[in-house]
């Protein structure tokens, strides 16, 4: 019985179209990547550092290709800009007070090989939204917004990595 269960657990993911994704092969010929801090076109101070940090963490977490700090020595350089962040109320109390806000993080990134050719990144990978709680305490709202921005940046960074992997992997 245990053996049958083990076989079914091994076969089930294959028959459903699911499978393991291996990132160990990296990005084909791209062995090193440099991530430049994007330009901040939003009114949120420091958001460019949050986005750049999320991208760098994602590349470090996946371990392929190797992250370098010097763009001149990289096979691929990622640069771009953070567009204005939009925030709006999403849920309200019975007395029309905002309970939740939603922010939309939109970045425009450009991936360029060392030979100058551009590697396309799916535009849908560069936009993410996240909700955060409202509060009467302005400091709590600020912290909730910062945390939502970190989460949105992290999800966006994973999507950008996946989009580049799909384009560059052999």
Image (cartoon, helix red, strand yellow):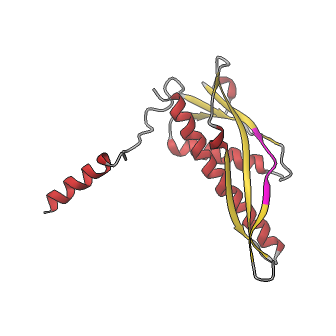
Residue 11 percent coordinates (x, y): 25, 49
Q: Which stretch is magenta? A: 81-87
* Image position of 64 (left or right of 47): left
Give the answer, above or below, for where 121 lies relative to 13: above
Residue 62 percent coordinates (x, y): 51, 43
Q: Quadrant of residue 17?
A: top left
Residue farthest toward the top in the current orientation of the protein: 115
Give the answer, above or below, for where 152 lies relative to 76: below
Magenta stretch: includes residue 151: no
At 62% from the left and 43% from the top, the residue drawn is 125
Residue 21 percent coordinates (x, y): 41, 42
Residue farthest toward the right in the current orientation of the protein: 43
Assign the C terminus to one quadrant of the image: top left
* Image position of 94 (left or right of 15): right
Q: Quadrant of residue 99?
A: bottom right
Q: In which quarter of the image is residue 37?
A: top right
At 62% from the left and 51% from the top, the residue drawn is 154
Assign the N terminus to one quadrant of the image: bottom left
Of residues 43 and 126, the one drawn nearer to the viewer in this rendering? 126
- Tag count: 0
* Image position of 4 (left or right of 59): left
Of residues 152 and 99, the one drawn nearer to the viewer in this rendering? 99
Residue 163 percent coordinates (x, y): 56, 37
At 25% from the left and 51% from the top, the residue drawn is 10
Magenta stretch: includes residue 86: yes
* Image position of 83 (left or right of 18): right
Give the answer, above or below, for where 4 lies relative to 97: above
């Amino acid at each position: 019985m245990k053996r049958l269960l083990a076989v079914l657990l091994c076969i089930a993911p294959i028959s459903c179209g699911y499978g393991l994704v291996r990132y160990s092969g990296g990005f084909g010929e791209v062995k090193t990547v440099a991530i430049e801090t994007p330009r901040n076109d939003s009114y949120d101070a420091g958001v460019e550092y949050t986005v750049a940090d999320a991208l760098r963490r994602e590349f470090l977490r996946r371990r392929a290709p190797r992250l370098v700090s010097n763009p001149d020595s990289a096979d691929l350089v990622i640069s771009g800009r953070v567009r204005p962040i939009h925030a709006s109320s999403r849920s309200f109390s019975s007395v029309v007070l905002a309970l939740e806000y939603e922010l939309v993080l939109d970045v425009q990134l450009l991936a360029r090989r060392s030979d100058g050719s551009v590697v396309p990144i799916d535009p849908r990978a560069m936009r993410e939204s996240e909700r955060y709680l409202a509060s009467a305490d302005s400091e709590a709202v600020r912290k909730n917004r910062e945390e939502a921005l970190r989460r949105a940046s992290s999800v966006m960074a994973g999507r950008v990595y996946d989009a580049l992997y799909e384009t560059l992997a052999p």
